[in-house]
Image (cartoon, grey):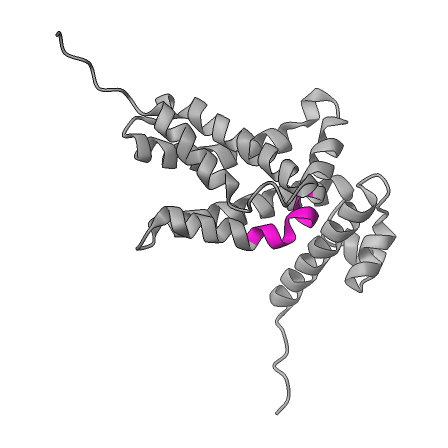
Amino acid sequence: MSRQRLSRRESQVLTRSRLLDAAAEVFAEHGVAGASVERIADRAGYTRGAFYGHFPDKDAVVAALLDERTRREREEVAQLAAGEGDTWEALRAWHRERSAHLEEWLALRLELVRHTLRRPPGERSVLAQREAYAREALTGAVARELGTDAAEAEFTALVIHALEDGLAIQRAIDPDSVPPDAIVAATEIVLRGARPTEPRGDD
């Protein structure tokens, strides 16, 4: 039986996805500065023309990768939180699975952050938006867990978000000392400290 031919739209989506995957690999290996358009296109199996048919330059690829990775993780975590069963155990399993590719993920994330911070302050909005988007979902989850509103949960969410980055770096450096689901345990500790205390009555 002959293979079904892709529509033009499906072909474009596939090409873009392959270019992004190739760019993620090349950026992690060589840095954004050391990654040429030709190297990315070749890794994906396409030509320079195919690259420029989807992205005007490397900065556009950086922005797309930041957006794609953030949205993917936010959707996965949201599904875990909405599912039945123990949410914390589901989060532990998710982090353990993700830790198998921690070094590649962390190398890419740090390279994208490094590249963005080298831009003039006015051109860093893509990174700022990515971080705000990630914290937004976390803020909602923290607010539900603590029984507070989003404004009161924002700082706690920021602390947890920063802990995740720090623990990822520590695990990449010394995986024997930092468990793959360390961020879940750290989050539980932070939330316990952030819970409103019951007012004490007069003795």
Q: Looking at the figure, which quarter contains the C terminus?
A: top left
Up/down of 164 relative to 75, above or below: above
- Name the magenta segment's main secondary structure: helix
Closest to the observer, 186 or 57:
186
Residue 35 point in image, percent of width and height: 84, 46
Residue 173 position by quadrant: top right
Residue 130 appears in the figure: no
Left or right: residue 69 versus residue 31 is left
Task: Using the rendered view, name the quadrant where residue 201 is placed.
Answer: top left
Residue 185 part of the magenta segment: no
Q: Nearer the viewer, residue 72 or 86?
A: 86
Taking the spot 46% from the left edge, 49% from the top edge, the residue there is 92
Seen at 63% across and 45% down, the residue is 176
Q: Which residue lies furthest to the top in this view?
A: 202
Q: Describe residue 196's horizontal placement relative to residue 4 as left or right.
A: left
**Quadrant (top left/top right/bottom left/bottom right) for the N terminus:** bottom right
Measuring 31% from the left and 54% from the top, which residue is drawn there? 85
202 versus 196 height, above or below: above
Q: In this view, does 107 lie to the left or right of 70?
A: right
Q: Give the range drawn in magenta.
A: 98-106
Residue 185: where, in percent of width, then height?
A: 45, 38
Name the image quarter holding residue 13: bottom right
Residue 99 falls inside the magenta stretch: yes
